[in-house]
Amino acid sequence: MTSLAGLAQIVDEAARTAAEIPQLTDSLPELTVDDAYAIQALSVARRRLRGERRAGYKMGLTSRAKMQQVGVSEVVWGRLTDAMRLTEGGDLIRARYVHPRVEPEIAYLIGKPLEGEVSAAEALLAVEAIAPALEIIDSRYRDFKFSLPDVVADNSSSSGFYVGSWAKPSTEVGNLGILMEVNGRPVQIGSTAAILGHPVRSLVAAARLVARAGERLEPGDIVLAGGATAAHPLTPGEYLQTSFQSLGTLSFHVVA
Ligand code: OOG
Ligand code: MG
């Protein structure tokens, strides 16, 4: 069997060069979720060797809309680096991706280490700030189709993220309306409550799941809680504007 390091190279190169690949499980149907997290760690280690720095974690498939859209109903997580952070208001260059999609999320900024089994109240005590966020996901797999081990190995489709203005940690984000518009036309309408009932549950899950990989949420980390609505596929010429009730608006243009 191809080594885990060899598979990490395949997914990392696909992401680096924006080239689509077949699902790993097409040729390796026995690939486990544990193998997939090992591949993810090795692929992110390759990014670190190229100079990218840790920026935090992203949770995925934390809402029914997202699970239904991709046909995988297991919560997943991935690793964020500084190179994935995009500047709000700027242009998103479509050619840098295989088939990018955008989804509205909530970002937590971690102020104190957090790991293992924690309650929602304990998790919130570790939060320094909360912001509206957009994630740009870009599965490297053909037709954006994958099984659970495939998507995990591909760093849970991580490729970019925007973070809006930070609000204080006491800001209530349990049920805030979200409106995503493309060129002034609504394309997704939802609520932060779609994220596991409350986005803080995603933070609790993050602390538990990264601990399984021997890691913890560190001060300075950003944790994305997962898409609240289905993701919108991006096409050049689109102007995306997403308003988060009481938190603010995030926007960008898509260019070729
Ligand atoms: C997997 C990543 C899911 C989310 O927020 O649900 C995710 C995918 O949909 O490609 O980032
Ligand atoms: Mg996401």
Image (cartoon, rainbow, N blue to C red):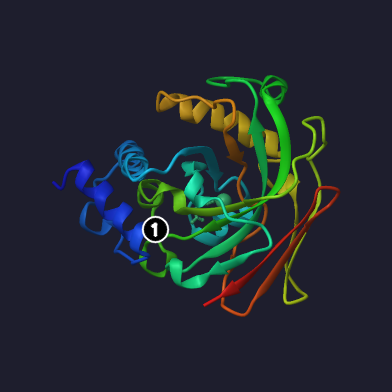
Point out residue 167 in the picture as x, y percentages from the top left corner: 79, 38
Q: Nearer the viewer, residue 2 or 234?
A: 234
Point out residue 231 in the picture as x, y percentages from the top left corner: 60, 62
- Is 118 placed left or right of 169 in the picture? left
Q: Is mark 1 within 8 Å of ligand 1?
A: yes
Q: Quadrant of residue 66?
A: bottom right
> Which residue is found at the position 55% from the left and 61% from the top?
69
Q: Nearer the viewer, residue 108 or 63?
A: 108
- Is 253 placed left or right of 40 in the picture? right
Q: Which residue is mark 1?
A: 146
Q: What is the number of callouts on the image?
A: 1
> Which residue is found at the position 50% from the left and 51% from the top?
84
> Which residue is found at the position 66% from the left and 36% from the top?
108
Element class at badge 1: loop
> Which residue is found at the position 62% from the left and 33% from the top?
203
Q: Quadrant of residue 147?
A: bottom left
Point out residue 202 in the picture as x, y percentages from the top left corner: 62, 36
Q: Nearer the viewer, residue 143 or 15?
A: 15
